Amino acid sequence: MKNLHILLLIAILGTAITPAAAARTISITHSLDYKPYVFIDENGDSRGLIVDYWRLWAKKVNVEVKFIPQNFQTCITMVRNDTADVVGGIFYNEERDQYLDFSKPFFDIDAILFISIKITATAPEDLIGTPVGVVKGDYSEWFIKTYHSKLSLKTYTNYDDVIQAALQHKIKAFILDRPNAIYLLSQHDALGKFRQMQTLYTQSLRGGVQLGNTELVDLLNRGINQINDQEVREIYKKWVSYTPLFPKKLLQTIIIIGSIFLFAILILNTLVLRRRVKQKTQHLQQALDSLHEKNSALTIEITEHKKTLHKKEELASELKTISELIPICSNCKSIRDDNGYWEQVEVFMKSHTKIEFTHGICPKCVAELYPDVAKSKLPDN
């Protein structure tokens, strides 16, 4: 019995001193240089948005994570060959769906077609015949081959190689994710040498695992579901301040200069507008004055026309009055009016028209009435 107690005590003590089972370790492979999402610092450690996200995820599901930096294509190969568990940040497409399973999305990223400022292209089709730089195996390569197959692609090992080729004028256009491209261009002081022509697509970063590993997919999604929006914002906030695009003072200077410039444009626009209004007002006044002059001339013309018309009407009335048959004496030439009275010609005409008579004497009557005067004053004939 005593020996039995000793054995039982040994078993209990053995159980107590047995170390707790180690937490599961998930190996996550990622790109070597995809700033600010992931990169290797001067100490050889993995840093960036994606690294912080997976560390937070590991706490949520109580596992350890081991980061394995590789070029992107090698990351995919390692997961397919089961030498790594997860591709830490990858976009879904139909081709990759043939050999990988994917977690839920956790970061949204815009892919931008950048072109040299010396090019006047406005759409991807304008770049036919111009090589477009992409990272080999990147989602952008698949996207262009699928949706813009007429474009010529030139592939590079990593994102920095794409930027270097663009700076060395080996390519005039390239496709990179917006945050990564802006960061790399700013490092080379080359933001002003290229412009963002078009957003080609917006994709979501996911975790990629070996095809058929549904258990690991479920684990990834369980942790992703436990990470809230505020925690994601905190991660972004950390790395946005880590790689600012513009220094604070420079940004303030740009804002001040921009405000002054906009104010100057507003003042200039106001002055130009006032000048145009003044010119238009002068033109309208001139047109109005001209219209008044024409109206006055037309009024005078109408008045004169009315006077002329009135005179014509009076004359027509007079002509109508005297156009009838007039009874006249064949001897004394008196005219009989409508009442039967006989009047001298001048009296009749005066009462029926506005004709006034003056009296004189013709040579024939002078000879008959005043023969003596006629002989001395009139010619013999």
Image: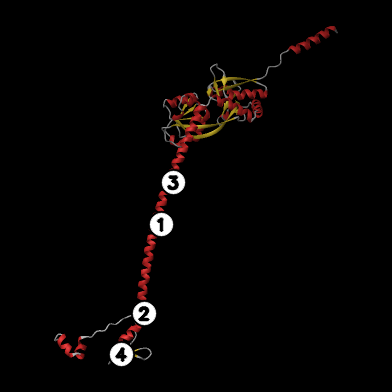
Q: CA distance from mark 2 to mark 1?
A: 42 Å
Residue 130 is left or right of residue 371, and the answer is right
* Mark 4 residue crowding within 10 angstroms, few (<14) / some (14–19) / many (20+): some
Is the N terminus in the top left, top right, bottom left or bottom right quadrant?
Answer: top right
Which circle, 2 or 4, is nearer the viewer?
Answer: 4
Helix, strand or loop for disc 2? helix
Q: Which residue is mark 4?
A: 334
Q: CA distance from mark 1 to mark 4?
A: 64 Å
At horizontal 36% and vertical 66% (from top left) the residue drawn is 301
Q: Which mark is residue 288?
A: 1
Helix, strand or loop for disc 1? helix
Helix, strand or loop for disc 4? loop
Q: Is residue 316 visible?
A: yes
Q: Are marks 1 and 4 in contact (CB under 8 Å)?
A: no
Q: Position of residue 247 (x, y in %)?
A: 51, 26
Q: Which mark is residue 45?
A: none
At horizontal 60% and vertical 23% (from top left) the residue drawn is 52
Sequence-first tag of 2 and 4:
2
> In the rendered image, which quarter is residue 78 located in?
top right
Q: Looking at numbered disc 3 in the image, what kind of residue is underneath it?
A: Arg
Q: Which mark is residue 317?
A: 2
Sequence-first tag of 1 and 4:
1
Q: Looking at numbered disc 4 in the image, what kind of residue is underneath it?
A: Ser
